[in-house]
Image: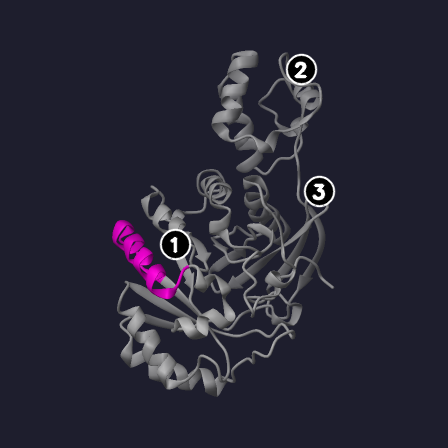
Amino acid sequence: MEGISKNRINIKGFKLDELKDLFKRTVSKGYRGEQIYKWLWQKGVNEFEDMTDISKDERNRLKNEFYVSELKEKDIRISKDGARKFLFELEDGESIESVFIPDEDRRTVCVSTQVGCPLNCLFCATGKMGFKRNLRFYEIAEQVLKVQKSVGERITNVVLMGMGEPFLNYDEVLYALEIINKFIGIGARKITISTSGIVPNIYKIGDEKYQFKLGFSLNAATDEKRDKIMPINKTYPIKEVIKSLKYYAEKKGMRVTFEYILFKNFNDTKEDAIRLSEITRMVPSKVNIIPYNSIGINELLPPSEDDVDRFVKILYPLSPSAITVRWSKGKDISAACGQLKGGFK
């Protein structure tokens, strides 16, 4: 293909419009870009030789000019509860983790969006490794295909609750979700973006055309307590986040999910439950109570079942929101909420 560098280029690094434009300029076949995109993202093909509706001569030219990057599965661990944790190596040698979570009729993949995380939340193992880089859109989307192929089951739901803060990698995340929605075929309302409260991009996602669901990692109902465990709260305090969530809910006509990690003797008092109920009355919402999964490097403690039950019994009659307790799967393989750290050491 004339006009393209002789150094082979990763074809997955092109967005669809870019690839279509490239083929229009080089071989006057703009449809070829969409053809290749379907092979890459609908069928999960990583070899040009397998793209059988493209002529052999053209496949050979593609091989000479391009290559198809691929996440390298370095390790996989299987929990006694059916969850699976995947360790993927990227082209530059960095690593990320993804988690497969089977639950009744749902097959969910928890996807990473960054290598590490800059937010340094006290309860999260990912934050302790620091921030290394943002993932590209294709590195995000491919996690879904890789896990789906490995487990041999169709993925029904995707949650961006793995390594990293999705809204600090907004553009790459959004395009990855377009691929997951349009090509991999997972409905927008089956995709949840979880954020620690990056206010400008909560407003921004509210204006997007897609009906992706939004989760807010609240974890404490006062700024004083939230400051202690989530430094981002000093930049975007609860009041400002709530304003942006109201905007999102009104624009989308959708509820927000408040994610509330419960810590023993920290945010589990009667007063905490009352304050949380007050917050839930400000935004159409549901609440996931997530018992803390210890990472062993801080003073925070997981609650007992009795602690969780007591807190929920206070919260339930006060809050207009649906309340669900989410006991994380995969704790025995360090695949539970907050335990991902980019390696299986």
| First in residue order: circle 1 vs circle 2 | 2
Label 1: few (<14), some (14–19) or many (≥20) C-alpha neighbours in 10 Å: many
Q: What residue is pinned by disc 1?
A: 199
Residue 173 in the magenta stretch? The answer is no
Q: Nearer the viewer, mark 2 or mark 3?
A: 3
The secondary structure that dominates the magenta segment is: helix
Distance from label 1 to label 3 (Cα)? 31 Å
Position of residue 239 relative to residue 302, above or below, is: above
Residue 180 x, y percent position in the rendering = 48, 43
In which quarter of the view is residue 49 placed? top right
Region rendered in magenta: 236-256
Distance from label 1 to label 2 (Cα)? 51 Å
Question: Which mark is on residue 92?
Answer: 3
Q: What residue is pinned by disc 2?
A: 57
Indicate left or right for 158 with 3 as reference. Answer: left
Indicate left or right for 214 with 318 as reference. Answer: right
Indicate left or right for 85 with 289 as reference. Answer: right
Residue 242 in the magenta stretch? The answer is yes
Q: 238 or 57, which lies in front?
A: 238
Quadrant showing the C terminus? bottom right
Question: Which mark is on residue 189?
Answer: none
Distance from label 2 to label 3 (Cα)? 31 Å
| First in residue order: circle 1 vs circle 3 | 3
Hey, what amino acid is under mark 1?
A: Val
At x 28%, y 63%, the residue is 283
Q: Secondary structure at mark 2?
A: helix
Hey, what amino acid is under mark 3?
A: Asp
Residue 114 x, y percent position in the rendering = 58, 50
Q: Secondary structure at mark 3?
A: loop
